[in-house]
Amino acid sequence: MSLTPSINAGNLERGLRATITAGRVLTDAEDLDRYTADTFWKSLYFQARGTPLGRPDIVVVPADEREVAETVRLANETRTPLVAWGGGSGTQGASVPIAGGIVLDLRSLNRILEIDDASLTATVEAGLNGREFEQRLNERGLMFPHYPASAEWATVGGYVAARGSGVLSTRYGKIEDLLMSLSVVTPTGEQITTVSAPRHAVGPELTQLYVGSEGTLGVITRVTVQLARLPERRRFEAVLFPSVDDGVAGIRDALQRGHRPSVVRMYDPVATRTTLDPVVSTGVEGVCALLIFEGEEAAVEVEASETLRLAQAHGAQLLDPGLSESWWEHRYDFYSPPHHPALPAIWGTIDVVASYSRIGAVYEALQESVARAYAPIGLQLRAHFSHWYHWGTMIYARFVIPDAAERPDAEALHDEVWKAGVDAVIAAGGVFNDHHGVGLKLAPFMRPQWGAAFDQLERIKRALDPNNIMNPGKLGFSP
């Protein structure tokens, strides 16, 4: 048993069954086994070996926010570890219950509570599936412009807890830019709701404290988010740049002149060949950038023509726009078989972000420390730039080592590649994550990334969660 000495599994189960709706407290082995891994490579690797990184002692599927609060209250009183579970689609191990205890599956909290057509906002429960939310909005001519690759599985609360980003982020922003307010059950069982307006001037914005907190500071139960109207038009374009540096400069110039494509997806030569072409069949080699513009007809035409003009000033050649449209239609295929890696490969996405003045050095650091250093054992690094800002951009750099999970040193090799890449990124002035979260995978690097400021995060954690029950061991906090 993984439960703390203050309570045994039988006592905890009886306490939960006394306050939670019948049938929503699960203890059968088959039920518990469903919560041993997210999509983090190491969690899948050990799950496949029959020795999972973590397994809950009890699963609670709360019917409402009251049952969430009661579960957290009991966990705190008994000092039982608790992990909030959304869609289980995270890539960093944030949902793996490494200390056992309770897994709180929030997917029954899946109602749309309000759609405010005048304000273009919606209030929804945290367990609502992202794809379902989008379909319901589309029926009303609306959209939630946060289209992550995980939309088929992830929940809206998970978007917030992991500080996620979707493919439309260059125009609409990441999840923190789309969030108005949220409700949270604190680690001691209280229910709170943050101020209804973002970026207010009535003190620090508590809402943002919980964005990216990965369940370590409380359980998000509902959120109010901004919506957008479905665009009148989407225009698709594709270009080929002479080099990565030229591509970065061309897109940077467009963004810093105020143009906002909804999608900019720029693939380096390896990724064009091994990631993009198998899905879209480009027939091109080199640095391929896919662009999508959306909104009212006239505005789309101006924005697209000016962005293409600036790209051509940096040597871009215009390609068939159908490449971009095909990517849009198949954008989720990249994350499903046969295009997504699977065991027995070793893989991981070294997601990094930096200012424009540093991004070239960061890209080269990844090439040197990962692509070239591990090429002799068959590693391939496929990098694309998928989220862009006025001040910089991010690199989605996936490494794949075919069949390497069969090696006796597979775990050590996985960790070695990650350390080499992250150390190089930090040394080059980058930040090792843009939107995938931290979880277990990146926990060892939090202090090197933050420096002395990490002490402040630890003080906040101790103040809000004095018994350290909330997702212990994640975000670099103590297990």
Image (spheres, rainbow, N blue to C red):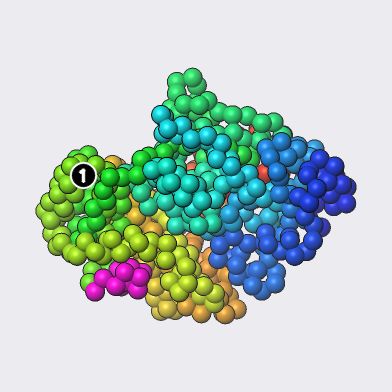
Mark 1 lies on residue: 297
Q: Is residue 118 left or right of residue 44?
A: left
Whether residue 428 is visible, yes or no, is no
Q: Is residue 275 magenta?
A: yes
At mark 1, the secondary structure is helix
Q: Which percent across, then down, holds residue 134?
A: 46, 48
Whether residue 9 is visible, yes or no, is yes
Instruction: Tell me what residue is drawn at x 35 percent, y 44 percent.
Output: 230
Q: Which percent across, then down, holds residue 49?
A: 66, 74
Q: Which percent across, then down, holds residue 171?
A: 32, 44
Q: Quick one: quadrant of the N terminus?
A: bottom right
Q: Which percent across, then down, holds residue 246?
A: 19, 57
Is most of the magenta stretch helix, strand or loop? helix
Near-viewer residue (20 or 175): 20
> Which residue type carries mark 1?
Glu
Mark 1 closeness class: few <14, some 14–19, many ≥20 residues within 10 Å: some
Magenta stretch, residue numbers: 270-283
Q: Is residue 125 left or right of residue 468?
A: left
Task: Locate residue 77: give its quadrant.
Answer: top right
Q: Is residue 470 magenta?
A: no
Near-viewer residue (212 or 333): 333
Q: Is residue 94 left or right of residue 50?
A: left
